[in-house]
Image (tube, rainbow, N blue to C red):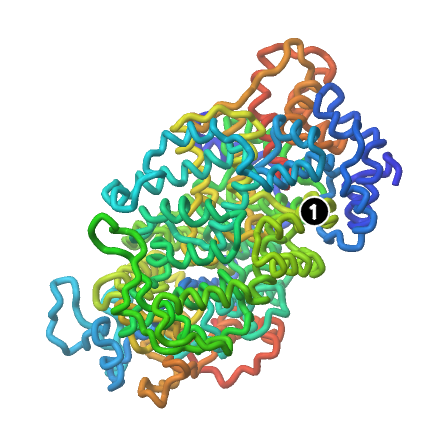
């Protein structure tokens, strides 16, 4: 077997019959829509920080008089502090006099200054669980405290937003070997690791026949057949659209990491005529019970990767960010008081980031509950003053143009929005 | 149901439970079964012999057959049993099951200490780090140690005669997950595998739990090594209750987590000297005051006994019995086991004092297992190992590295799952576009002998016809009947326009074999355990 030459592979595949949705899709994507006056839906990029990221050391409340007492060794030095701790340490980067960015998030500061980036603090789930798996499950279903619905909130959004029978397998993409729970449900979603490798490997001339034969073995209507059919559709759509032709623009430099690769591929998919509406990207390693570090160390490395990937993505897409919205979330935050291992245990309230052309950025949103002992949630956690669904609901309505909130977040009475995004134009 | 009415679509729409049972009942007389592989010794599994005992119970179990249907004619019961109790059928195990019968095969596999595994033991000699003391291990290159452990896991799954034991080891490896590629666990997971998971995999749950709690690999992974009186760390306490014992909703509260964390203060790892890397209880950092959890008081002054007392309460708790029994049923029976089966397994767990072998006897002896063909999707690890076993492939040291590389891409390299909950078990977690494509590409690679160091048995008799070749390899790799239309697809692939029953030019047979093997390994038939 020799590796398949990409170009001839695509040429050969061009002869394959395409799914029924394909021709129409090719004329229904962004550039054409721009010529009309109807508002255009954002592409949503949902980033999940698995393991409970420390929001207090991400968007740092340097103005809270209790912060440094709780974080004697891992606290992030305030912006005005002399830069001790070595050349790479640094101090927090001031945002509004009260909150400051972790120094590793420096690459995001220009976007904050450009009002493309906002943060929400003391956000999270109203459910008090401190279990990673339960909290992730609730957050991805979009139903805190309930597992009654088996579908994810993004899949329900896609169901509700399905306009005219658009069933591109690339409406929703999850990066990784396992599909994100938020994407699970009746609307097909594609899981992929690498666009480059997303095809059957084999000798040219034989692999096309092979694919046809294999497809005939997945021609029934069972659950597994359906998985097979979704996979063939995704292979064919990707080959036809060839997103690899889109190279990073504007000098964007993606970090050489799983996250960087995923964000680079989201950018490629969003440029190709694939009808991408939602992409989910996971980034792991945030469960910093031990040796979390402060301005440098474990968390700083994680945040550095996150910031570099986000900054490269926004730089790469440039003007296209007008119609792209990135939101970060994590299952819960971490304990206010650091532990004896130089880390933090499971907490509650957290920070979220929202990035995109439609964001009312340059601001940290939310009502700050404070870090004094009597202001904490049990057993010593940042309170949640903004339900994560409040942030997402505003995005769903204003940027994804889906007003059917009861379908997306059933039972949720959204409070007045924070005004974190503008209505889509 | 008549044989002519049997089709995937009928099976799917006729009501899965009834259709499934009816197909099983008709299997022996169904001409489909006899015609699919007319010239294979394995046909004996379909047509001949008395049905194993649990089949009689099958009719009674119709109501509990899960609703998922593969739409495929089910494998012969003995093939199914071997597939479910091993990492994938092979002629040797099929013959053994034929000799021992259903219950006899289960019983033999439940007593691995009586099965000679010396050939595997000799092969494992290639991995010296498996047997090293912790202090010596810690002086080795960390990647070498971690790679040898992963290679050994693959080798054992492929070649061990103690197949059920290896499945149990895999189960507990995930239940007591330790990410083997971070911090000290590059080295110490090897000790955990050798001294915690493997010795107790069919033993007493309480012994396994105690060993895990004191395992330096676990102490490092869930941070208990730094859990001290001056600064408690809750990580192990929380996950021990949520994942290892009581389960979510087992009644524990945040306050219980804090109290249990204090009971485990001082459980740490020896940092230096000849005992470096072994368990150490440090009284100086242990909070020996009284603690309460789940309404029980752990008295002051017990020292290390406080943690042991907590483990004893957890191991004997009804929530633990239900949680562990439920996970075992999901692993061995179906993604949606009946509450009755879980309750029966939990009752055995409690009555036997957490005897894992007894719990397995209950689960494997159940009518629900006998009716659970095509209810468990092979995860990537199971798919890779089953393919190598079915292909009777020769593996050299480089081949194990190739397989490890494939498993990494497919998302299930052993000991490489970072969160503490272990690799997901249910098929829905794995059957996405990426999962389907990566297993298809594995089949293509194996079919083409493109994995370095992995060489399949590709022998076939002279003057073979397209139909013969298709039947021969479908029989070897699947050992289960095919729908006529699917068999036809395989024959068409091989024949490539020639008559199906005319002898093939040898060049054509050889040219078509890689794709044929890939089609079979990539087909829906092969994806089920």
Can you say which quadrant of the picture contains the C terminus of chain B? top right
Tell which of B360 and A200 is nearer to you: B360
Image location (x, y in percent) of residue B305: 39, 66
Q: Is residue B160 above or below residue A419?
A: above
Image side of residue A274 versus residue B491, left or right:
left
Image side of residue A74 versus residue B130, left or right:
left
Image location (x, y in percent) of residue A211: 59, 34
Q: Is residue A7 above or below residue A90?
A: above
SS state under label 1: loop
Tell which of A85 and B190 is nearer to you: B190
Count of numbered badges drawn on the protein: 1
Q: Is residue B350 above or below residue A358?
A: above
Image side of residue A396 versus residue A374, left or right:
right
Tell which of B130 and A336 is nearer to you: B130
Residue B133 visible somewhere in the drawing = yes
Tell which of B211 and A238 is nearer to you: B211
Please give the residue where the numbered disc 1 appears in the rendered image.
Answer: B365
Point 47% across, 55% down: residue: B207
Q: Is residue A249 above or below residue B88?
A: below
Give the quadrant of residue A352.
bottom left
């Amino acid at each position: 077997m020799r590796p398949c030459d990409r170009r001839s592979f695509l040429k050969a595949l061009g002869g394959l019959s395409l799914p029924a949705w394909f021709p129409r899709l090719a004329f229904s994507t962004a550039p054409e829509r721009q010529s009309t006056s109807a508002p255009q839906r954002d592409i949503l990029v949902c980033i999940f920080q698995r393991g409970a990221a420390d929001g207090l050391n991400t968007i740092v409340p340097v103005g809270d008089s209790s912060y440094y007492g709780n974080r004697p060794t891992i606290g992030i030095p305030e912006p005005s502090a002399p830069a001790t701790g070595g050349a790479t340490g640094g101090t927090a980067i001031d945002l509004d006099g009260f909150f400051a960015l972790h120094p590793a998030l420096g690459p995001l500061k220009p976007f904050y200054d450009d009002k493309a980036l906002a943060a929400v603090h003391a956000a999270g789930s109203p459910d008090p669980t401190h279990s990673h798996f339960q909290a992730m499950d609730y957050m991805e279903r979009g139903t805190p405290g309930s597992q009654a619905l088996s579908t994810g909130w993004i899949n329900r959004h896609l169901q509700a937003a399905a306009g005219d029978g658009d069933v591109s397998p690339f409406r929703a993409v999850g990066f990784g070997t396992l599909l994100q729970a938020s994407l699970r449900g009746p609307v097909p979603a594609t899981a992929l690791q690498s666009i480059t490798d997303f095809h059957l490997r084999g000798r040219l001339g034989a692999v096309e026949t092979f694919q046809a034969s294999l497809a005939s073995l997945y021609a029934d209507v069972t659950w597994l057949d359906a998985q097979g059919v979704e996979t063939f559709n995704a292979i064919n759509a990707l080959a036809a659209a060839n997103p690899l032709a889109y190279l990073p623009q504007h000098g964007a430099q993606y970090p050489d990491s799983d996250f960087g690769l995923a964000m680079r591929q989201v950018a490629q998919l969003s440029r190709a005529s694939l009808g991408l509406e939602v992409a989910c990207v996971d980034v792991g390693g945030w469960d910093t019970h031990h040796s979390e570090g402060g301005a440098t160390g474990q968390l700083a490395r994680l945040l550095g990767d996150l910031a570099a990937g986000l900054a490269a993505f926004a730089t790469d897409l440039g003007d296209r960010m007008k119609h792209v919205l990135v939101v970060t979330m994590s299952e819960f935050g971490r304990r206010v008081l650091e532990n004896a291992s130089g880390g933090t245990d499971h907490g509650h309230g957290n920070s979220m980031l929202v990035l995109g052309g439609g964001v009312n950025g340059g601001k940290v949103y939310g009502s700050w509950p404070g870090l004094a002992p009597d202001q904490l949630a049990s057993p010593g956690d940042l309170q949640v003053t903004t339900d994560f669904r409040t942030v997402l609901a505003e995005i769903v309505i204003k940027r994804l143009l889906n007003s059917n909130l009861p379908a997306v977040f059933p039972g949720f009475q959204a409070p007045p929005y924070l005004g974190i995004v503008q209505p889509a134009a | 149901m008549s044989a002519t009415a049997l089709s995937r679509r009928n099976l799917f729409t006729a009501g899965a439970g009834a259709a499934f049972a009816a197909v099983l009942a008709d299997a022996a007389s169904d001409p489909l079964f006899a015609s699919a592989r007319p010239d294979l010794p394995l046909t004996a599994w379909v047509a001949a012999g008395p049905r194993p005992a649990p089949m009689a119970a099958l009719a009674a179990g119709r109501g509990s057959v899960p609703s998922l249907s593969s739409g495929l004619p089910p494998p012969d019961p003995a093939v199914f049993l071997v597939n479910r109790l091993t990492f994938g059928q092979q002629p040797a195990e099929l013959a053994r099951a034929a000799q021992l019968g259903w219950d006899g095969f289960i019983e033999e596999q439940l007593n691995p200490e009586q099965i000679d595994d010396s050939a595997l033991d000799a092969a494992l000699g290639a991995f010296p780090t498996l047997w090293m003391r912790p202090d010596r291990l810690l002086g080795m290159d960390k990647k070498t140690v971690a790679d040898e452990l992963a290679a050994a896991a693959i080798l054992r799954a492929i070649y061990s005669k103690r197949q059920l034991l290896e499945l149990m080891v895999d189960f507990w490896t995930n239940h007591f997950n330790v990410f083997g590629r971070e911090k000290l666990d590059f080295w110490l997971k090897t000790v955990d595998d050798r001294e915690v998971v493997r010795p107790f995999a069919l033993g007493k749950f309480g012994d396994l739990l105690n060993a895990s709690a004191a395992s330096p690999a676990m102490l490092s992974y869930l941070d208990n090594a730094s859990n001290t009186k001056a600064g408690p760390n809750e990580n192990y306490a929380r996950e021990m209750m949520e994942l290892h014992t009581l389960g979510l909703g087992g009644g524990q509260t945040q306050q219980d987590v804090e109290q249990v964390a204090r009971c485990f203060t001082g459980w740490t790892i020896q940092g230096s000297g000849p005992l470096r890397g072994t368990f150490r209880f440090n009284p100086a950092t242990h909070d020996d005051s009284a603690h309460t959890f789940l309404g029980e008081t752990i008295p002051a002054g017990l020292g290390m006994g406080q943690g042991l007392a907590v483990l004893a309460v957890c191991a004997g708790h009804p929530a633990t019995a239900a949680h562990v029994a439920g996970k075992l049923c999901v692993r061995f029976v179906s993604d949606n086991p009946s509450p009755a089966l879980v309750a029966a397994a939990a009752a055995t767990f409690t009555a036997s004092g957490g005897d894992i072998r007894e719990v397995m006897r209950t689960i494997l002896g159940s009518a629900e297992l006998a009716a659970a063909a095509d209810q468990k999707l092979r995860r990537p690890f199971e798919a890779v190992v089953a393919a190598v076993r079915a292909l009777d492939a020769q593996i050299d040291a480089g081949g194990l590295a190739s397989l490890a590389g494939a498993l990494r891409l497919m998302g299930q390299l052993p000991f490489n799952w970072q969160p503490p909950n272990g690799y997901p078990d249910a098929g829905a977690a794995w059957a996405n576009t990426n999962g389907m494509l990566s297993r298809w590409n594995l089949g293509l690679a194996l079919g083409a002998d493109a994995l370095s160091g992995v060489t399949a048995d590709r022998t076939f008799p002279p003057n073979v016809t397209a139909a013969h070749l298709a039947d021969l390899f479908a029989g070897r790799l699947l050992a289960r009947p095919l729908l006529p239309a699917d068999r036809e697809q395989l024959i068409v692939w091989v024949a490539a326009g020639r008559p199906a029953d005319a002898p093939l030019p040898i060049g054509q047979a050889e040219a078509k074999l890689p794709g044929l093997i890939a089609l079979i390994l990539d087909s829906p038939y092969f994806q089920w355990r």
